Amino acid sequence: MLSTNRLLFEYYTVDSNLFALIVTLVYLYFVCRNKKINKVFYLLRLMSLVSLMITFLVVLFVLPFMVPLQFLFWGVYGSNLILHVICPLLLLFIYFKYDEKVKINNFELIFNMVPTIIYAIILITLNIKGIVDGPYAFLRFKFQPVYQSVLWFISIVGITYPIGSLLNKYKK
């Protein structure tokens, strides 16, 4: 069990923000060089935005009810305010204001689930093996019934498709 030594990529918040940072830096490189940006890269932009929106929505609608006393620390204290609120909203603003509208079909929207599924599989495995505990209450598979774990997995991974679909639909 890790107590004070946390894994660098243990938190979805960190992973999604790093993913968004890398994709945004590459995007800026293309824009500054007046290079054409292909559809695959726009899909990566959308995937990174969906990942950040998952972070934002979990902090807004899940953590306050699961860990009410720790919510201010987990959700909006210090750098968590930047990672959980400011970065997702900033990327959302940039997406709607500056990104080109690219036709992404329903099948391609499924790829928005990939980062969340990868994270879930890795962290579930680490939790089951006892290498990490959590870091979120809904990942603590040893301390909750299997059906509850399955419902959390389906809920969080399942919300990625509608988020991506809505973002794609309302992009002008």
Image (cartoon, grey):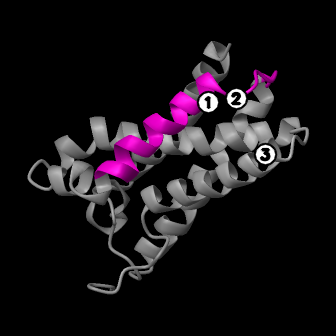
The amino acid type, in three-letter code, at marker 2 is: Asp
Is label 1 in contact with label 2 (beta carbons under 8 Å)? yes
**Mark 3: secondary structure:** helix
Residue 35 visible in this rendered orientation of the protein: yes
Q: Which residue is mark 2?
A: 99
Asked if residue 119 is positioned above or below residue 127 in the image, the reply reads: above
Q: What is the crowding at mark 3: few (fewer than 14 residues within 10 Å), some, or many (at least 20)? A: few
Q: Which residues are magenta?
A: 81-105
**What residue lies at 41% left-to-right and 82% top-to-bottom?**
131
**Mark 2: secondary structure:** loop
Work out whether residue 160 or residue 47 is closer to the camera in this orientation and state it: 47
Asked if residue 67 is positioned above or below residue 15 in the image, the reply reads: above
**What residue lies at 38% left-to-right and 81% top-to-bottom?**
130
Q: Is tag 2's residue or tag 3's residue first in the polypeptide sequence?
A: 3
Q: Which mark is residue 95?
A: 1
The amino acid type, in three-letter code, at marker 1 is: Tyr
Q: Nearer the viewer, mark 2 or mark 3?
A: 3
Q: Which mark is residue 32?
A: 3
Quadrant in which the N terminus is drawn: bottom left
Report x, y in % for residue 146.
Answer: 38, 55
**What whole-number distance in Å separates the C-alpha atoms at marks 2 and 3?**
14 Å
Work out whether residue 106 or residue 154 is closer to the camera in this orientation and state it: 106
**What whole-number distance in Å separates the C-alpha atoms at marks 1 and 2?**
5 Å
Q: Which mark is residue 154?
A: none
